[in-house]
Image (tube, rainbow, N blue to C red):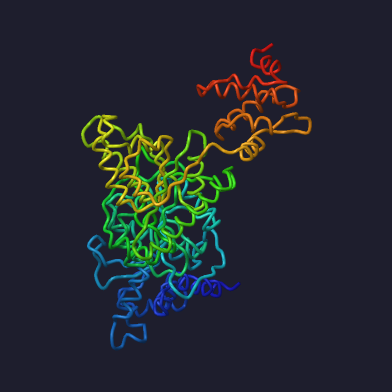
Amino acid sequence: MDFLQHLNQRLTNCTSVLGLSRLSREILRLLALVDSKDDVAEDLRKKDRYDRPGVLSWRTLAEQIPNTQTSVAPVEKATLALANWGIIQIVGRTATDPIAPGPASLRMTYAGRVCLGLAPAPSFTAISHTEDPVPWAILHSASRELLLTHIHDEITPAALHPIPIPTSAGHDINRTCGEIAIQLCSNGGALVDGFVQSEHTIRHTLHEILVRTANARAPRILMMMDPSVVRPTALRIGATLRWVEPSVDTRRGRLVLDSRVTQQLQKHTAGGDASHTTGVPDSDIATPKRCSTQWEDLILSDRVGWQMKQAMRHASYRLDTQAMAGKTGYRLLLSGLPGTGKSMAAEALATALDRPLVRLDLSSVLSKWLGETEKQLSQVFDVAEAANAVLVLDEAESLLRQRNSGAGGGGMGTGVAYMLTRLDLYQGVLVATTNRIEDLDEAFFRRFDDYVVLPIPDKPTRRTLWERHLILADDSDVDLDVIAEKFAISGGLIRGAAIRANGWVSATSDPLSTPHVLASLGRELEKNHKATNEVYIQPWRNAVKAILEGS
């Protein structure tokens, strides 16, 4: 390929991807010819009375552009657009530039040479771009590694090298913009790493970079820990913000942000809730986590299963339809003995609603110091609300107990009053579980939208649970009907006993049998402080005793 053809191809690619005007293209072409000492460059040099090698004076350039006969303003705008991208340098523009006689001089930068093919590019791919500017995508999370993985897996498989944000102003901003231009022109996308530099001290630097590069027609990604420093700039340039949910950690910082900016940002963030535009506060006592529990994992009786489906429909209606009227939030109270599946039901609800789950650990919020319990509770509610999560209050009777019971201390008196108020104001999904429903204060009941009791499973459900958890082979000899009928126990006890029985026979050549299951159930009942006499039933009494006593 002729080198001029190569230059024109790269020039077309560069101006299209960077969203430059026709006038900027013409200026860039002239500077490229000057840089490569073309014949045109020789003619321009003769007309340049300052005759500085390798550069073109601003006056000469302005005189050579045809449409500057009436005004130089269009040329100024086009030239500054090139300088903003860092692909040309204007010497004599700032106070720190060296003093030289005559008007300012223009020359190509290293980034400009790479973009135009006057220097070898790290890689070059034929760029497919749109006719309209592509907005910046600002991704934020608590984990830099998570962001890099998410960008590679979900957005672009291209090996984009993260461009660091400069910590000082001036030429470093020009260099960063030039590196962004190189990635855009070479790979069709750019990745900027502001993760460790997301403090307010570089607000101006980030603003300059985002504004200068706002009109490109290819994807640009800025990854950060805290998006608060760029929110006004993002609103100005139409950038989208998205919180990439961490699997374990959460983002740091608990900031008070302007709700008006949040609402406007959410309008052009697809499917956005507040977590995308404000981030999620960090907390040592509450962590949003994703669950994989499905409704099918819950083995419930037909009646209870139907009640849970109705609760799901009710929740979806409140969160979708009523949210449009400004009324959001859903509160579900689950009651039942330990092991009946209350926690699993909360996880299944979170999975069905496609939301993370935040579990309130009572031991982490109670404090003997005045006001400290409320402060800790507020932190958990704030994290859950910001993460758009399902908040689970296990053992809710400890937090929502009757105020006249006289029980508890260490801040729980004021904590109960605080919980009453916070339940009214909470805008998310809340699931409270309890096995002591009689201890709950009556004032809390009317604040729940649904109440479902998870009883001890009936015989058919118990048999299904045993079948689900036992590893039954062809030579197994387990009378599930007798075990399911004889022992009216919770699903948690069934699961524990089944896993233990599976473990016992896994290291031997013995097939799984009814005595193994009964003996394992005896251990499980003993562990939970329950009578074990009933496991010694005929005709397996002696076999069960032999397994338990090791004879």
The quadrant in which residue 19 appears is: bottom left
x then y, percent, for residue 510: 75, 23
x then y, percent, for residue 416: 28, 39
The quadrant in which residue 109 appears is: bottom left
What residue is at 47 percent from the left and 67 percent from the top?
218
Q: How many marks?
A: 0
Residue closest to the eye, 295 or 333: 333
Residue closest to the eye, 131 or 389: 389
Q: Quadrant of the N terminus?
A: bottom right
x then y, percent, for residue 51: 33, 73
Residue that lies at the very extreme toward the right in this rendered image = 475
Is residue 139 rendered to the left or right of residue 258? Answer: right
What residue is at 68 percent from the left and 23 percent from the top?
516
Is residue 503 rendered to the left or right of residue 91? Answer: right
Residue that lies at the very extreme toward the left in this rendered image = 370
Is residue 136 rendered to the left or right of residue 400? Answer: right
From the viewer's perspective, is residue 544 above or below residue 476? above
From the viewer's perspective, is residue 538 above or below residue 42? above
Residue that lies at the very extreme toward the top in this rendered image = 551
Could one spot residue 111 in this view of the protein? Answer: no
Q: Quadrant of the C terminus?
A: top right
x then y, percent, for residue 339: 51, 34
Residue that lies at the very extreme toward the bottom in this rendered image = 70
Residue closest to the eye, 363 or 169: 363
Could one spot residue 437 in this view of the protein? Answer: yes
The quadrant in which residue 24 appears is: bottom left
